[in-house]
Amino acid sequence: MLTYINPKLPMRNKAITRDFYINKLGFEQLGKEDYDGYLMLKKDNIEIHFFEFAGLDPAVNYGQVYIRTDHIEEWYGLALAKQLNIPQAGHLHLKPWGQKEFALLDPDSNSLTFGQAI
């Protein structure tokens, strides 16, 4: 039986990634260990792991995560208030598959799509 999925995304700079997720999105570091070139973060019931990829070109990064939430309006409001990088087509809207969604990009252009069932 499968129990969880913890996506692994590339990061160029651990300090910048940690700062973005903790100070902009309210995540916390998982565990007390600081692993070289690896970062584990959590918020509520999700974890996202990051691996160091110093040569990553954000313009061609296709890292993506879909995060389900029960509070889409609050998350979207937080993204707007903190002036996070929301792509042109990433603003909050209703999708034909019955989800209200928006997307934002982290400092390495990993796409985080937030969705709530309608």
Image: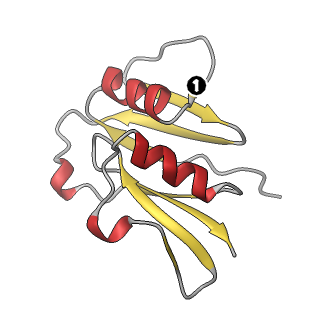
The residue identified by callout 1 is: 28
Where residue 71 sits in the image (x, y, percent)?
A: 67, 54
Which of the two residues, 22 or 74, is positioned nearer the viewer here?
74
Q: Could you say which quadrant of the image residue 68 lies in? A: bottom right
Where residue 80 sits in the image (x, y, percent)?
A: 40, 49
Instruction: Left or right? Give the position of 9 relative to 40.
Output: left
Q: Measuring 52% from the left and 68% from the top, which residue is drawn there? A: 101
Task: Look at the picture and state if 70 lies above or below 51.
Answer: below
Q: Mark 1 is on which residue type?
A: Glu
| Number of numbered tags placed on the structure image | 1
Where residue 6 sits in the image (x, y, percent)?
A: 60, 46
Which of the two residues, 85 or 64, is positioned nearer the viewer here?
85
Instruction: Left or right? Give the position of 10 relative to 112.
Output: left
Q: Could you say which quadrant of the image residue 19 lies in? A: top left
Q: Measuring 58% from the left and 72% from the top, which residue is drawn there? A: 100
Q: Measuring 61% from the left and 33% from the top, which residue is drawn there? A: 42
Which of the two residues, 34 or 113, is positioned nearer the viewer here?
113
Question: Helix or strand or loop: what does disc 1 sit on?
Answer: strand
Task: Look at the picture and state if 59 lies above or below 94.
Answer: above
Where residue 99 sits in the image (x, y, percent)?
A: 61, 75
Color style of the picture: secondary structure
Q: Measuring 27% from the left and 36% from the top, which residue is drawn there? A: 53
Neighbourhood count class around disc 1 (C-alpha, 10 Å): few under 14, some 14–19, many 20 upward: some
Q: Could you say which quadrant of the image residue 26 lies in? A: top right
